[in-house]
Image (cartoon, rainbow, N blue to C red):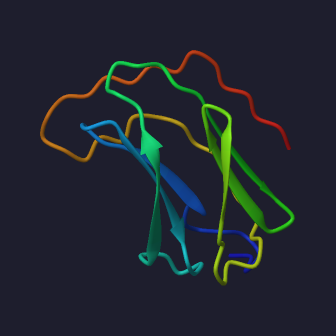
Amino acid sequence: MDASVSTKPVCELYYDQNGNITMGVERTRAGDDEAYTPLGNVPVGTQFSYEIEYYGGVLKVAINGNFTTLSTYSLDSPLSYFKAGNYNQGSNASDVHFYALTIQH
């Protein structure tokens, strides 16, 4: 595989059952070494917006328009991909609604 392409997600946005929003950022391309940054809290059942921007080696995330710049450690701007979904890892059911998705390259 091309060494410039990431095989692991650069970042993942987490939302837990208490409404806490956290961004996990991989520190290396090998993966399994995420750094977690708390971004805030939105009560469960409350609609919120988020934006993830990764351009020129700079990673930013906004919750309801409030941007935070995050370190990308030693990733060195790999080519990356985008996914959105409900990746529930718990034993309880969860329900996620996406009202709009916009992707810009």
Say which residue appears at 26% left-offset and 28% top-offset.
94
Viewer-nearest residue: 26 or 18: 18
Observer able to see residue 81: no
Looking at the image, is 24 positioned above or below residue 61? below
Looking at the image, is 19 positioned above or below residue 99? below
Observer able to see residue 75: yes
Say which residue appears at 52% left-offset and 21% top-offset.
98
Say which residue appears at 65% left-offset and 72% top-offset.
71
Viewer-nearest residue: 82 or 97: 97
x and y, in percent, of residue 49 in the image: 59, 28
Q: Quadrant of residue 1?
A: bottom right
The number of numbered discs placed on residues in the rendered structure image is: 0
x and y, in percent, of residue 40 in the image: 45, 45
Viewer-nearest residue: 27 or 84: 27
In the image, taking residue 5 as reference, residue 57 lies left or right, namely right
Q: Quadrant of residue 3?
A: bottom right
